Image: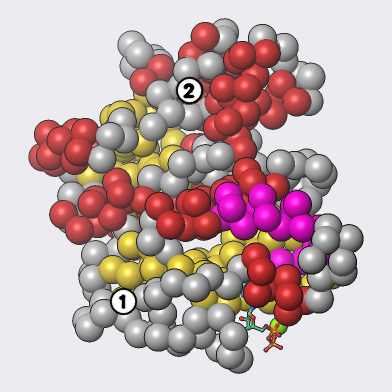
């Protein structure tokens, strides 16, 4: 078929999303529902995340990277629960069926899916403004989920990887901040192709080392706030201990504080664990080649206290990202 032959909805699904390979699903794409059989005695973790053009990504965004990111943000939710990825569905609204776009999008999507053994088992396809909604299914042992309501006073607070480079890239695109071209491309890669911390999340759940976890998508202060609220506790954060992304680390202290605390699009894990687990957590993080940094502790007193490296209180005006207020 040439580039100009119109693609029907079913040709489109068959050519770009159906793959001829055996998978985990009992029944994959093609029927009214897919069928999944969980391994005996395991629970299924389920999460959906939607990416909307002009809201979550720029019009004209690179299709391959968009395929990666659409699944990455969903895998990040499984990681934050400690669930191993099994399968996903893809609901796609497209303004037109463009072969080049579909080929690149599905390539980016499947490269990440294959890296995590996560099989596409169904979805929906319609014409409309570009909108990508993925639902992921993961597996875990009952009682092992890293829930938001399990933080305990005295726990350490840990962050995986680094924070703030994605937000810095956004500042670059918005011309709020000037970056050298090589800095911009390094920061932008954190924004467009985030790495979900799946192995770290699963190991934290399977070893029982962590109490509570969340993935940081809307900024640390807001997302940690969800753990504090759900667990009925407070926290003290050492702002100068926060691991800044390599590009952000070279910017002013003020920008570093602001974007590590309230950036967005980080897709790192924030988790709590008792101090007795410190060495084991460091070993586990090394095992999955994901840095983990201790940045504070959970307290009985409600609220979040920000302090500097000397322990002196900081009064920073910060807001996490909210779709309906910004
Ligand atoms: P229905 O009419 O029941 O909604 P569809 O005709 O939309 O079913 O889809 C046919 C089959 O293709 C279903 O198994 C559905 O799950 C699958 N499917 C549709 N769109 C996609 C997609 N973008 N990716 C993967 N599978 C899809
Ligand atoms: Mg349908």
Nearer the observer, 102 or 216: 102
Element on which disc 1 rests? strand
Residue 85, compared with residue 189, is above or below; it is below
Task: Please name the colour scheme applied to the rendered image.
Answer: secondary structure
Q: Earlier in the sequence, mark 1 or mark 2?
A: 1
Residue 108, compared with residue 89, is above or below; it is above
Left or right of residue 145, residue 110 in this image: right
Judge whether residue 100 is colored magenta: yes
Q: Position of residue 44 (x, y in %)?
A: 37, 75
Q: Position of residue 202 (x, y in %)?
A: 28, 55
Residue 212, compared with residue 164, is above or below; it is below
Element on which disc 2 rests? loop
State the extent of the magenta-drawn residues as a range. 91-109
- Viewer can see residue 49: yes
Residue sitting at x 24%, y 50%:
204
Residue sitting at x 57%, y 8%:
252
Q: Residue pushed farthest bottom?
A: 32
Work out which quarter of the rendered image holds the N terminus and state it.
bottom right
User: Neighbour class for label 2 at 10 Å: few (<14), some, many (≥20)?
Assistant: many
**Residue 43 circle label:** 1
Disc 2 target residue: 245
């Amino acid at each position: 078929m040439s580039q100009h032959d119109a693609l029907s909805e079913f040709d489109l699904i068959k050519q770009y999303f159906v793959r001829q390979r055996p998978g985990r699903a009992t029944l994959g794409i093609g029927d009214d529902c897919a069928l999944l059989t969980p391994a005996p005695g395991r629970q299924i973790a389920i999460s959906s995340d939607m990416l909307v053009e002009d809201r979550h990504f720029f019009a004209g965004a690179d299709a391959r990277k968009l395929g990666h990111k659409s699944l990455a943000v969903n895998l990040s939710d499984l990681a934050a629960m400690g669930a191993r990825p099994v399968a996903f569905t893809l609901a796609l609204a497209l303004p037109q069926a463009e072969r080049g776009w579909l080929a690149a999008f599905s390539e980016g999507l499947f490269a990440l899916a294959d890296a995590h053994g996560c099989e596409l088992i169904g979805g929906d396809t319609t014409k409309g403004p570009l909108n990508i909604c993925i639902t992921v299914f993961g597996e875990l042992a009952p009682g092992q989920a890293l829930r938001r309501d399990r933080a305990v006073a005295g726990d350490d607070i840990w962050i995986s990887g680094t924070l703030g480079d994605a937000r810095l890239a956004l500042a670059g695109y918005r011309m709020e901040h000037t970056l050298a071209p090589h800095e911009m491309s390094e920061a932008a890669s954190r924004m467009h192709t985030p790495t979900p911390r799946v192995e770290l999340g699963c190991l934290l759940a399977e070893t029982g080392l962590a109490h509570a976890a969340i993935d940081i998508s809307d900024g640390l202060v807001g997302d940690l706030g969800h753990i504090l609220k759900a667990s009925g506790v407070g926290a003290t954060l050492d702002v100068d201990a926060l691991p800044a992304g390599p590009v952000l680390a070279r910017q002013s202290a003020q920008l570093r504080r602001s974007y590590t605390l309230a950036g967005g699009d980080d897709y790192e894990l924030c988790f709590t664990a008792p101090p007795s687990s410190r060495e084991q957590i460091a070993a586990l993080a090394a095992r999955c080649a994901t840095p983990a940094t201790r940045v504070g502790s959970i307290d009985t007193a409600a609220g979040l206290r920000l302090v500097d490296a000397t322990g002196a209180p900081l009064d920073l005006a910060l807001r996490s990202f909210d779709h309906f207020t910004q």
